[in-house]
Amino acid sequence: MKPQLVELRTSVLSKNDHLAQQLRDRFAQAGVYVMNWVSSPGSGKTALLEATLTHLRERGFRVAALVGDLATENDALRLQRSGAPVRQIITAGICHLEANMVSVHLEGWTLADYDFLFIENVGNLVCPSSYDLGENCRVVLMSVTEGEDKPLKYPTMFNSADVVVMTKIDLAEACEFDRETARANIHEVCHDVQITETSAKRGMGLETWIDYLVNSRHAAVNE
Amino acid sequence: MHELSIAYSIVQAADQAAVEANIPHVDAVHLVLGALSGVVKEALLFSYDIATQGTRLEGSRLEIRENPVVVYCSTCQKEQTLPTIQRFRCPTCDTPCMDIRQGKELEIVGLEA
């Protein structure tokens, strides 16, 4: 007997994509600019996010953050020092955030009360690349301690970036980090991506970074 | 490694389609996997056997067709297949290409029963 063939055209992640689109519509309606931050563990997402929340608040912006972590609430507790509302998403071992986790953790917040919402993903440069969270902008961070070839090792993630932040730039010299090679590698996998350099600890590059955020929001959100 | 959750999503979608098509047991699921999907074929195949246990897909094959990345080159004015995902440049003229036409797929294209 000939095998029976049933034709299908279903995206495996259609459920997540559908939910992400609903989130995107909600974000647009509320006028909140949403960023999804991804990087490997220990590249300095939380440190830069703390500085970002503090600086944006000083400039009069209303900010909030969701932070993903496999097991602890440490990041949320640390970020709450900025004075911004922060919620932890504990994924209980899942290596990435999905749109429904974001949706559930937004319950009780009025999105229109915020200008920026930051989503700090689980530290992982592979898995989060497949999951749309409804964000306006995907930020990929890489610290100088990770080496210049990170973009070539994780091209899928870097290719999906809207902006790349090179963090811990104050350590570049000590690590013999070659910025030009790193920039060239980033541009090999994502030609038109914007690249910026920061050191959250020393306050380097933060003004440029905050200006970038404010301008990006201005271009994306109609008020 | 998120291939196990991807495998469960495949099983869920395929199972639903099988119910709708009145298929009691599925022999194979045909999947297209783009080079930029972020999913590793070997890990997915391994996870698939676990995810299908106790379902109407148990014992079925996962047939994976891998799609390379295809970009549109504005200089050559045509689509070009990239030999590697480490370099988003036209393989003919070296123009940087970010207009991705293929390679992000993670799609079930059919069931075999």
Image: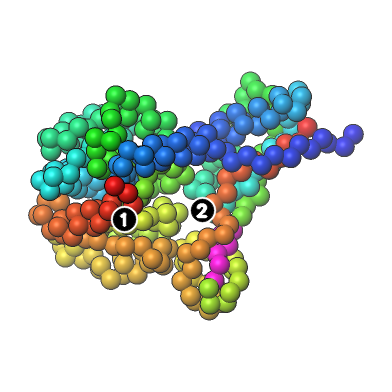
Judging depth in this view, the residue of A129 and A63 nearest the camera is A63
Judge from the rendering whether residue B12 lies leftward or rightward of residue A41; answer left or right: right
**Foreground of the two, B19 or A18:** A18
Numbered badge on residue A219: 1
Residue B60 falls left or right of residue A189: right
The percent coordinates of residue A99 (x first, y second) are 42, 35
Dot 1: element: helix
Residue that numbered label 2 is attached to: B36
Residue at the outermost front position: A223
Residue shown at 42% from the left, 63% from the top:
A189
| Percent position of residue B28, x then y | 72, 36
Q: Residue at the location (47% across, 64% down)? A: B98
Position of residue A165 relative to residue A134, above or below, is below
Residue B45 visible in the picture: yes
Crowd class of label 1 (few under 14; some 14 to 19; many from 20; radius 10 Å): few
Amino acid type, label 2: Leu
Q: Chain of mark 2?
A: B
Q: Residue B110 lies in magenta, yes or no?
A: no
Task: Give the Cα distance between marks 2 and 1.
Answer: 28 Å
Q: Kindly state the secondary structure of the residue where label 2 is placed.
A: loop
Q: Is residue A169 left or right of residue B48?
A: left
> Which residue extends farthest top?
B54
Spot occupied by residue A206 in the image (x, y as percentages of width and height): 15, 56
